[in-house]
Amino acid sequence: MNQNAKEVGQRIKKIRTDLGYSMAQFGELISHSPKTTVNNWERGVNLPKEDKLNKIAILGKTEVNYLLYGTPEEFMDKLVEEHFHLKINSVMLDQMVSFLKQQNVDLYDEITIIDFIQGIIDSGAISEQEEPYLVYSKVAGTNELYLVNAANDPVDTAPQYYAYIEEENATVHFLPYTFAKRQRALYKHQPNLQDQVTIDYYTRTFELLNIPLKEATIIYYGIDTNHLKVDIGCYRYNQKSKVFDQLENKANHYYKTFLAEVKKEIAYLSITR
């Protein structure tokens, strides 16, 4: 992918100004380059040569690839737009970058990234469709807990769920998000995982969580609001019928933290009824 000289210049300028150097002082540090040369870099007239880019990156405590292409998210966003003529929502971009980091992939390897994105497109996780679907953002400081937003939802793009991911069991636990606008409704209604649109809504980006759809189990933490008791649905994907079959609930499959939160909500509802 070609570099945008003006954007490169803006990054160089930010490094210089963050360090508090004048153009002349900065140029002296970069192989005794004159002030006019630094000025040309920052205006995007031309790019520094490789040895000078390396020195600028060292001063800025960053990488040459960042200087040339921006963050991995920015690089991937531009690559998808240029190569596939698509736009990806920012939450999903973050999720893809996080996944690739876990795989120790060079986040600026253009061919590898194109091949990865083509696979995601072929799986249906990225498309030009406008139907809402869930995207998963890891909660800082955790490995298994995620906030879950609905992408392409014209009404509410705020978090809808917490998700707890058991990668080794290909299991995703869903708990309605504490501050979701539709929290009560999300607790009340189990998802219809016999419906293909609903299945796509919950699972479109499962592959980015290392959850193969053909092996996936969903555990949904709800409330029987008529009797104020816990209502947990356990569903496993049926590769033959391409839908989720409901399984017999087993307490040892539950995520105790989510179960405790459901019980707290029931206690609150019993007081406020």
Image: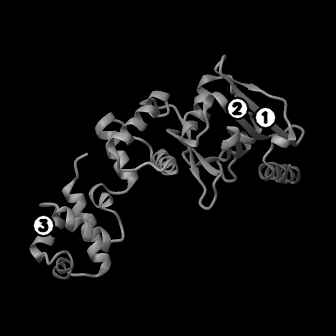
- Look at the numbered discs 3 and 1 and tell me whether their residues touch, using CB distance below 8 Å: no
The number of callouts visible is 3
At horizontal 86% and vertical 41% (from top left) the residue drawn is 251
Sequence-earlier tag: 3 or 1:
3
Specify the amino acid type for callout 3: Asn
Residue placed most toward the observer, 145 or 132: 145
In this rendering, the label closer to the viewer, 2 or 3: 3
267 relative position to 119: left or right:
right
Per the image, label 2 sits on a secondary structure element best described as loop
- Look at the numbered discs 1 and 2 and tell me whether their residues touch, using CB distance below 8 Å: yes
| Residue ID for mark 2 | 191
Per the image, label 1 sits on a secondary structure element best described as strand
At horizontal 58% and vertical 29% (from top left) the residue drawn is 200
Tell me if mark 3 has few (under 14), some (14-19) or many (20+) residues whose alpha carbon lies within 10 angstroms of its own. Answer: some
| Residue ID for mark 1 | 233
Q: Position of residue 184 (x, y in %)?
A: 74, 44
Task: Kindly report the distance in space between the C-alpha atoms of the residues bearing marks 3 and 1.
Answer: 62 Å
| Residue ID for mark 3 | 40
Specify the amino acid type for callout 2: Pro
In this rendering, the label closer to the viewer, 3 or 1: 3
At horizontal 54% and vertical 45% (from top left) the residue drawn is 157
Looking at the rendered structure, which numbered label has been put on residue 201? none
At horizontal 36% and vertical 71% (from top left) the residue drawn is 61
Q: Position of residue 41 (x, y in %)?
A: 16, 66
